[in-house]
Image: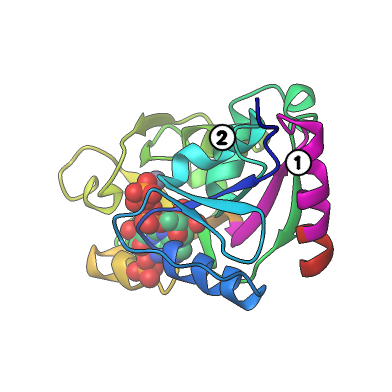
Amino acid sequence: MKTPTRIRLAIQKSGRLNNDSIKWLLQCGLKINYSKKTLICPVENFPIDILFVRDDDIPSLVMNGVCELGIVGENVLLEQTTAINENEIDQKYHVVKKLGFSRCRLSIAIANEKPFANIHSLRNLRIATSYPHLLTKYLNAYDVPAKILTISGSVEIAPRLGMADAICDLVATGKTLKENNLKEVEAIIQSQALLMKTLHPSHANKKRALDRFLSQIA
Ligand code: PRT
Ligand code: ZN
């Protein structure tokens, strides 16, 4: 059987990370010839195959060694790893570098007219979010009980629908919050895209390609 020597690098298939991830790879000197429909694309001048996937799948693909490398938002990586035992996680991946694009923050926001003095003003509120683990960890650190409602999208609309008193979602320019009559009151984490690598490469002989790529971008 032929020994695999090509490494896999996972990036988002479509969405906010896609363009800048490709731009960054091109800046690293990789020659990529891909179309929007491609799911896997061989790099012409390097033993790397680019895999196009949902961003949420990237941390586990890398942690399980299916892909040696991945580009993902810190927000997604932190939410997923917060859900798992920290010691177990530390042995599965390493953050190679933060890439400086897709910057945003995960913040709590409430209706403009609601009074807010400090984090304790959130006590016992219903907070809608797609980031239940990061939000729970943050509120627990301040000993603030709240009812967390996990929803997968359009989080900003939840207070208008009467489903929630507050939200916890990503903010970049603040335009979406403004449009939904919400004000940002607490920033939980700052985020940007990062390059992560597996600590479990599936074949030892892929290490040479991995080391060569990592030394090229150092
Ligand atoms: O389909 P797939 O699962 O791959 O993509 P997705 O829909 O889960 O993610 P996508 O493409 O929306 O975002 C990918 C990543 O981009 C996020 O995980 C963040 O790391 C990063 N990013 C940077 C953002 C934003 N900025 C951002 N502003 N992701 C989402 N937003 C949304 C936010 O949720 C809110 O609805 O934009 C709105 C707020 O933006 P402003 O500018 O109005 O404040
Ligand atoms: Zn996603």
Which residue is under mark 2?
Answer: 61
Image quadrant assignment for residue 6: top right
Q: Residues within 10 Å of mark 1 (few under 14, many from 20)?
A: some
Please report whichever mark, 1 or 2, sits nearer to the chain's N-terminal start: 2
Q: How is the image coloured?
A: rainbow
Q: Position of residue 142 (x, y in %)?
A: 65, 38
* Alpha-carbon span between mark 1 and mark 2: 16 Å
Q: Is mark 2 within 8 Å of ligand 1?
A: no
Which mark is on residue 105? none
For the residue marked with disc 2, what is the amino acid?
A: Leu
Q: Nearer the viewer, residue 49 or 154?
A: 49
From which residue to which does the magenta span run? 190-212
Q: How many marks?
A: 2
**Of circles 1 and 2, which is in front?**
1
Residue 44: x and y in percent read 57, 64
Name which residue lies at 29% across and 47% down. Answer: 155
Q: Residue at x 62, y 53 (%)?
A: 48
Q: Residues within 10 Å of mark 2 (few under 14, many from 20)?
A: some
Q: In the displayed structure, would residue 5 be above or below residue 176?
A: above
Is label 2 in a helix, a strand or a loop?
A: helix
Q: Find ligand 1 in the image and state its quadrant.
A: bottom left
Which residue position holds label 1?
206
Q: Horizontal and vertical percent for residue 18?
A: 43, 63
